[in-house]
Image (cartoon, grey):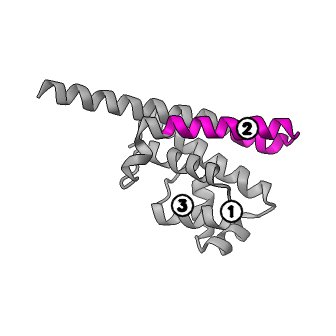
């Protein structure tokens, strides 16, 4: 069972995927066909009811054709759900902080060019990345405390 913070991140991950899908003018069925992922799976993911496997999320991101910073942010969200198997570096608070800085820069540029849709999506990503950062930092501190006890 996911902790409440991790559950919140999972919901934000799903809504972020939905916003990118809609921004590209894709229906769930379109994305399903492009990514080779079951239609029901996409619905569950977008509603925060299911956490994707690494392979499924990779196929979805490829089908959505996102920029590198958005892809990195989504992988960080995924890692923060505590799903088994995220690459260790994705759960590193330092890496997440760098992603926060990159997404903040992209959001600023989107606002400058008047792209409110992208800026809105990136704002949601920033909020989720901060959640992911807090989760990762909490795990790092707990791990350090446990090592100090031993």
Q: Which mark is residue 57?
A: 3
Residue 150 in the magenta stretch? The answer is no
In percent of width and height, residue 132 lies at 49, 36
Mark 3–mark 1 Cα distance, whole angstroms, equals 10 Å
Dot placed on the residue nearer the N-terminal end, 2 or 3: 3
Decide if residue 56 is on the left or right side of residue 111: left
Q: Which residue is mark 2?
A: 107
Q: Residues within 10 Å of mark 1 (few under 14, many from 20)?
A: many
Decide: marks 3, 1 in contact (CB < 8 A)?
Answer: no
Q: Are marks 1 and 2 in contact (CB under 8 Å)?
A: no
Under circle 3, the secondary element is helix
| Cα–Cα span, label 2 and label 3 | 23 Å
Say which residue appears at 65% left-offset and 53% top-offset: 17
Whether residue 8 is visible: no
Q: Which span of residues is magenta-colored?
A: 96-123
- Identify the secondary structure beneath mark 2: helix
Q: Position of residue 58 (x, y in %)?
A: 54, 63
Q: Earlier in the sequence, mark 1 or mark 2?
A: 1
Q: Are circles 2 and 3 on residues that touch, CB within 8 Å?
A: no
In the image, what residue occupies the spot 48% across and 33% down? 133
**Which mark is in front, 1 or 2?**
2
- Examine the rendered structure and indicate whether residue 142 appears above or below residue 39: above
Q: Is residue 41 above or below residue 139?
A: below
The C terminus - image quarter: top left
Q: Residue 64 — which label? A: 1
Q: Is residue 149 left or right of residue 6?
A: left
- Front tag of 2 and 3: 2
Picture coordinates of residue 99 (x, y %)? 56, 40
Magenta-colored stretch includes residue 112:
yes
């Amino acid at each position: 069972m996911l902790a409440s913070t991790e559950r919140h991140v999972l919901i934000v991950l799903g809504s972020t995927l939905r916003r990118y899908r809609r921004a590209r003018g894709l229906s769930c069925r379109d994305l399903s066909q492009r990514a080779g992922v079951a239609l029901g799976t996409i619905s569950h993911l977008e509603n925060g009811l299911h956490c994707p496997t690494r392979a499924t999320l990779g196929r979805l991101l490829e089908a959505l054709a996102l920029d590198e910073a958005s892809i990195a942010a989504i992988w960080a969200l995924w890692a923060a759900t505590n799903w088994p198997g995220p690459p260790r570096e994705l759960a590193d608070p330092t890496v997440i902080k760098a992603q926060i800085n990159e997404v903040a820069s992209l959001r600023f540029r989107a606002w400058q060019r008047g792209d409110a849709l992208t800026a809105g999506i990136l704002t949601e990503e920033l909020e989720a990345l901060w959640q992911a950062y807090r989760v990762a930092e909490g795990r790092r501190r707990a791990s350090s405390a446990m090592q100090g006890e031993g």
